Amino acid sequence: MSIDIPSISTPGLSVHIDLYTILIWIFVGLVAGLIASRLMLGHGLGIGADIIVGILGGLLGGFLAGTLGIQVVVPGHATITQILIALFGALILLLILRVLGLGRRRRRVA
């Protein structure tokens, strides 16, 4: 199963998404989310939340890198490059969530 999604920014260009691509996104999200949550919080958020934070961080990191003209390249290692961009975005996302007070566990007063 694969899907071709037309590019909004570049007419005539399409992005090919198949099962392999989705699995790579999940892997990159997992690694970036695990690292980011451990760096920012000192502990993980749980496997599902770490994957979500990593994937959203990848989107945020990719958007910010493209907008600010930042290029991150690890020659010969495209997956490591994706992990670094996702990590950058996940750290920013967790910082924003921490500033807004979201994701904090409230202590029960006995």
Image: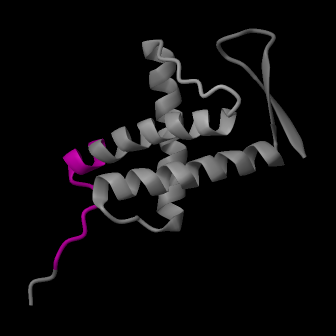
Percent coordinates x, y for residue 30 in the rendering: 56, 55
Whether residue 99 appears in magenta in the rendering, the answer is yes
In the image, what residue occupies the spot 81% across and 10% down? 12
Quarter of the picture containing the C terminus is bottom left
Q: How is the image coloured?
A: one colour
| Outermost residue to the bottom | 110
- Establish if 91 lies above or below 60: below
Relative horizontal placement of residue 103, taking residue 86 as reference (left or right): left
Location of residue 43 (image quadrant): bottom left
The image shows a total of numbered marks equal to 0
Range drawn in magenta: 96-107
| Outermost residue to the left | 110
Whether residue 93 appears in magenta in the rendering, the answer is no
| Outermost residue to the top | 11
In the image, what residue occupies the spot 65% across and 25% down? 75
Percent coordinates x, y for residue 94 in the rendering: 34, 47
Relative horizontal placement of residue 10, taking residue 12 as reference (left or right): left
Percent coordinates x, y for residue 58 in the rendering: 53, 38
| Outermost residue to the front | 75
Relative horizontal placement of residue 85, taking residue 27 as reference (left or right): left
In the image, what residue occupies the spot 47% across and 33% down? 60
In the image, what residue occupies the spot 71% across and 46% down? 24
Percent coordinates x, y for residue 62 in the rendering: 53, 28
